[in-house]
Amino acid sequence: MDIYELRSRRFSIFIEGPPQQNMATHRQIADGDSEAGGVLIGETRPECLVVTDVTTPQLGDTRGRLFFNRRAEGHQEQVVERWKESQGRLDYIGEWHTHPEKRPQPSLVDRVGWIWRSVQSGKPLLVLIVGQENCFVAIQDGLKLEQAHLCG
């Protein structure tokens, strides 16, 4: 399990082993690997977010070396299923995708999409980019993006 923290306030992000491994299988290592992504499913607590599951690319998603466009179909059904199984404890908490770089940074397209989703939902969004060597993890809260840092 990886643990990230926001430095501006006492807030932690826990990413459990299975979702971490699932995302890692989609790292873009080879030159021809396409971007992959999905949604983050987990639990929101007063001082932390816990990622318990992720969706992976679905048939309706479009993918290329430098882009990933997620469609709702397939992802939404999995979120609803986890929500029902957990009696409302687990829900959609954010977005993840890959970048073909060692130390990923969000693109302008990433930022605009995250802002739109955060504003539309009216709540902060956990955002994660899986790179070749490490991850970019942050909270998008309306127009404000705050990067989280790996503990340890």
Image (spheres, grey):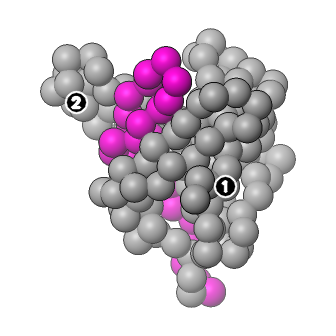
Q: Residue at x 71, y 73 (%)?
A: 101
Callout 2 environment at 10 Å: few (<14), some (14 to 19), or many (20+)? some
Quarter the N terminus occupies? bottom left
Residue occupying the point 55% across, 36% down? 12
The spot of residue 81 in percent (x, y) is 22, 30
Residue picked out by circle 2: 81
Give residue 31's quadrant in the image: bottom right
33 falls in the magenta region: yes
Q: Name the residue under label 1.
A: 136
In depth, the one of 67 and 142 nearer the eye is 142
Residue type at the position of mark 1: Phe
N-term mark: 2 or 1? 2
Where is residue 14, by image quadrant? top left
Q: In this view, does 140 lie above or below 28?
A: above
**64 and 13: which is toward the camera:** 13
Identity, as a three-letter code, of the amino acid under mark 2: Glu
